[in-house]
Image (cartoon, helix red, strand yellow):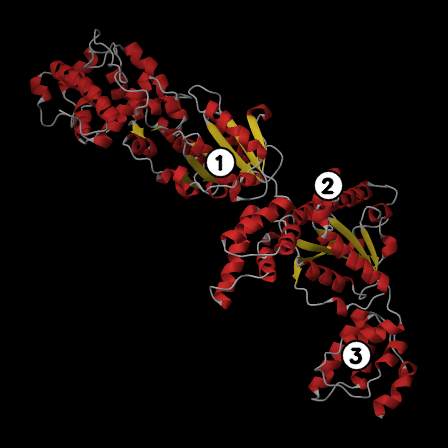
Amino acid sequence: MESAYPKDLGHALGRLDSLLRDTVARVLAAYGSATADDPFRGLYISRGDITRLLDNWDAHPVFTASNRPGAPALLDGLSQDSRLRRFARAFGLGEVDLWLVVIALAPEVDLRYERLYAFLQDDVSRRRPSVDLALTLLSATPAEKLARRAHLVGDAPLVRHGLIALPSEAQSIRWPLPACSLVLDSAVVQHLLGRDELTADAGDFTELLRGEDAEALPPEVMPAAVRLLPQLISEACEVGAEPLHLYFSGPPSSVKKRTALALATEAGRPVVAVDLETATRGDEDWPRAVLREASLRGAIVYAEPYGALLGEEATAQRLLWNRTLAAHGGVSIISGTSGALPPGFDAARIVPVDFPLPEAPDRRAYWNRCLDRSGVRLSAPGLDVLAGRYRLTYDQIESATTLATTRVHWLNGPDSAPSLTDLSTAARAQSDPALGELAHAIEPVHGWSDLVLPEDTIRLLDELCRQVECRQRVLHDWGFGRRLSLGRGTAALFAGPSGTGKTTAAEIIAAELGLGLYKIDLAGVVSKYIGETEKNLQRIFAAAENANAVLFFDEADALFGKRSEVRDSHDRYANIEIAYLLQRMESYEGVAILATNLRQNMDEAFVRRLQFVVEFPFPDEEQRADIWRLHFPPEAPHDEALDLPLLARQFRMTGGSIKNAVLAAAYLAAADDRPIGMGDLLHATAREHAKAGRVLVGEDFAAFEERCHG
């Protein structure tokens, strides 16, 4: 009669049936028909039971004869590609291991096995096979039975891979190993019964990916080194081959995961993808569960982000993962952002593959591809702006295109197309939000017309913007980038008294370049604790790498004093802090601006390494008059008698102080429901001087008496 089970499972259960049939016959012969037919057998211990136990004290099982042959061969007759044989190869299981698995699996297939096991164990409550019963069924002699305990202890494959659930060390004190029930892991049961979905044991941190889930990747998106991997993966998938570990490094991007799936599909393998951030918050045995799921399916493991295992609190889980992965056969791919190899791995046994942030020409091509796919046409200069201005991953370029297109369709209808401004706004929205937690985001509101500075200073600021905009042409098209290991970004020093326009200039530069502006107060970054300043700076620059922003370090002289002779450890570490910031500034590929009120306090060696040093002088009388006029909006009501040139001549104030005075005067006038008058401006000016510690006296206002009382 044809089996109702899959061929290999039906074959195995048929062998088990033969073994059980022979064993039941021996039990009936050993106990006699009267005892065997006792309806209460297994519920009590009779005098006859005691006698048989004592008479059989030489350790022979009650229903095993000394001349009984061992269990029949289980795999004979099965093809090499059968599920049971593949299962055995995946975990390195031998004949006895497979028999133990089949004995434990049988009740999951048919409950009649529970009754048979209960009968053979002389206990109606023991419906699962005990270790003792399983070893008895498989052993011809007591010595053989004792030796086969090794299949269920220590580093045996069934135990090491968690295929069979056995008591922990604490539980084994109460339950000796022979008394323990033989229970298969749920993933093993599901797999052997022909189902390949991931089980609940894998948690919500894994997913099974197959070829049909793969998205076609443009060849230019994948690093050139990827072309060498199919051969390595094919060799590692062979039976008995050494395991292959790959490390995909680079910024977060789905390209790495999609590349892993493409490689697995080419090798005819699925992928078990693991979210390490979620996994580390779950059961501590998650590494073994993940790799068990992968081995059951012959899948390639893809785990990201490895950074989730690098924290101090995750040390134990990292060590467990590394150790479990080292013993795992086949192919595994680890993904992380660091260029350094994952700690704990033998460099000779892991192949690094770098997925760098795409260079400007690659970004331009991908912008063009994504826009073309969305039916959007953008001019060549527009593509140059997007590619050169925003350092985005391929994922972020796709997201920015989708975001800009969707927004425009919502606002202007489905036939509208996003402009360069729309796309730039969407590109800025892809920035890593982590920087916003470490620095203050400033929304630029000023333009070039708001700057009142000497012409030379304005030209220098404009030159800075042009340098950033021409970076793609100079570094890539003209080849200068190949000669630079550092210094690809733009670093500038803004020096001048407080209120002379340094922050305003930073706003204008950010707006001109279409970038976000983040202000970092260095006075809050510098720590009195040795080593903490570098950690604070490291966090800021790490977050800034993916922020596409202008970094504006205010109060820079809090960190950069003149290098002095090293007298103690704090002097030495102060110089280390300066060197560290210099190193990070040189490696940062964006725009970084340092602002200081005290140019003379800046370290000269540091200043020489900056591309731009922009002086913001104290405004002269003519510039002060322009600043006074600049801060009056056209709609603000004011007396016709306002003499702004006289204010500029009489009071030496910075632009910041003038802005504060005009605003304070406006509030004074508004409170009395009248236009802004000269008296309001003088009152506000006196208050600004008082804030600086200077008290104005009567003679300071003598020139204004006629206008205030006229």
- The picture places residue 119, in percent across and down from the top left corner, at 16, 24
- The picture places residue 313, in percent across and down from the top left corner, at 55, 40
Residue at position x 61%, y 43% from top? Answer: 357
Using the image as rendered, state which of residue 329 and residue 165 is in the foreground: 329
Query: Residue 479: which numbered mark, if any?
Result: 2
Q: Residue furthest top?
A: 67
Q: Which is closer to the viewer, label 1 or label 2?
A: 2
- The picture places residue 252, in percent across and down from the top left corner, at 56, 44
Amino acid at circle 3: Ala
The relative height of residue 201 versus residue 390 in the rendered view (above or below) is above
On the picture, is 196 further left or further right than 133? right
Q: Which residue is mark 3?
A: 684
Q: Which residue is mark 1?
A: 260
Amino acid at circle 2: Gly
Amino acid at circle 1: Ala
Using the image as rendered, state which of residue 266 and residue 672 is in the foreground: 266
On the picture, is 273 further left or further right than 310? left
Task: Looking at the image, tell me whether mark 3 or mark 1 is earlier in sequence order.
Answer: 1
Task: Looking at the image, tell me whether mark 1 or mark 2 is earlier in sequence order.
Answer: 1
Q: Residue furthest right?
A: 699
